[in-house]
Image: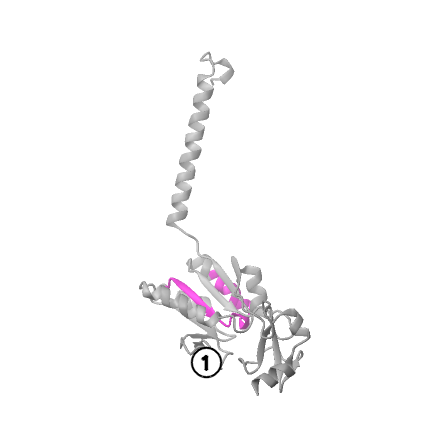
Amino acid sequence: MVKISDCSLNGTFPTLLVRLGCMKASISSIILKECLRSEKMAQLFFKYGAMNSGKSIEILKVAHNYEEQNKPVVLMTSGLDTRSGVGNVASRIGLERTAIPIFDETDVYETIANLEQKPYCVLIDEAQFLKKHHVLAFTRVVDELNIPVMAFGLKNDFRNELFEGSQYLLLYADKIEEMKTICWFCHKKATMNLHYVDGQPVYEGDQVQIGGNEAYYPVCRHHYFHPEMNKEVNNEK
């Protein structure tokens, strides 16, 4: 075995080894980058926001962008949301389209794995209503089927507690993004959902109470605790 200390090339041999090492490292880096380009790993996205933050319209927009390039997607939504009928993604501006409803017993992994054509993306509306097993199944869709999954939903309920679906999406999602909207009563960012009945705020009750503008306001923290309900009722009159 030749030792560098035994070499009489006045540093030429060590320098050559260093250069060869740099070349090997550079080549390895190039190969790694090419592998990453050719085999991009899918990710699980969770995009959350208060009521009226444009979650449903964003899903429809994303679906349109994919399909405009002839890239099929799968739309799914909670079977609990019946405001526009079961299995519909509907925005407040009137756009809507059908989707696969998700119920407690729905095996979302098998549903997607058994599709005749592999989708480029799975889009989920009302993701806050997912169960833990649904979220774990969607992680398998991402990791095993290499299909991106984008989930949209509320983070906290009107009692200011996490939904089950949101809790586990926050834990397991690769990327988390807040969709912003403003408070119903001021210019601040809305981070909470105020439930009201007959013009009065409600802070207790069953977590799942389906409603739209007629039942909820997106509000900031201050107006969650101190809503200007009388002012709002007078404005509506």
User: Is 3 left, or right, of 113 in this rendering?
Assistant: right
**The C terminus sits in image quarter:** bottom right
- Measured as percent of width and height from the top left, residue 132 is found at 56, 67
Q: Nearer the viewer, residue 6 or 148?
A: 148
Which residue appears farthest toward the left when viewing the image? 70
Can residue 202 be seen in the rendering of this structure? yes
Using the image, determine if residue 112 lies above or below residue 84.
Answer: above
Q: Reply above or below: 81 against 187.
A: below
Q: Say which of 170 and 6 sits in front.
A: 170
42 sits left or right of 182 in the view? left
**Foreground residue, 235 or 192?**
235
Seen from the viewer's position, the closer of residues 24 and 223 is 223
Find residue 190 and report its horizontal and vertical position in percent: 59, 69
Q: Is residue 107 visible?
A: no
Q: Secondary structure at mark 1?
A: loop
Q: How far across and down, in percent of the image, does residue 33 sit?
A: 41, 43
Q: Is residue 130 magenta?
A: yes
* Residue 141: quarter of image: bottom left
Quarter-wise, where is residue 23 in the image? top left
Binning the other alpha carbons within 10 Å of mark 1 as few (below 14), some (14 to 19) or many (20 upward) gives: some
Q: Is residue 40 above or below residue 176?
A: above
Q: Which residues are magenta?
A: 119-140
Residue 47, position in %: x, y? 51, 64
Residue at (42, 65) in percent of width and height: 122
Residue indicated by mark 1: 86
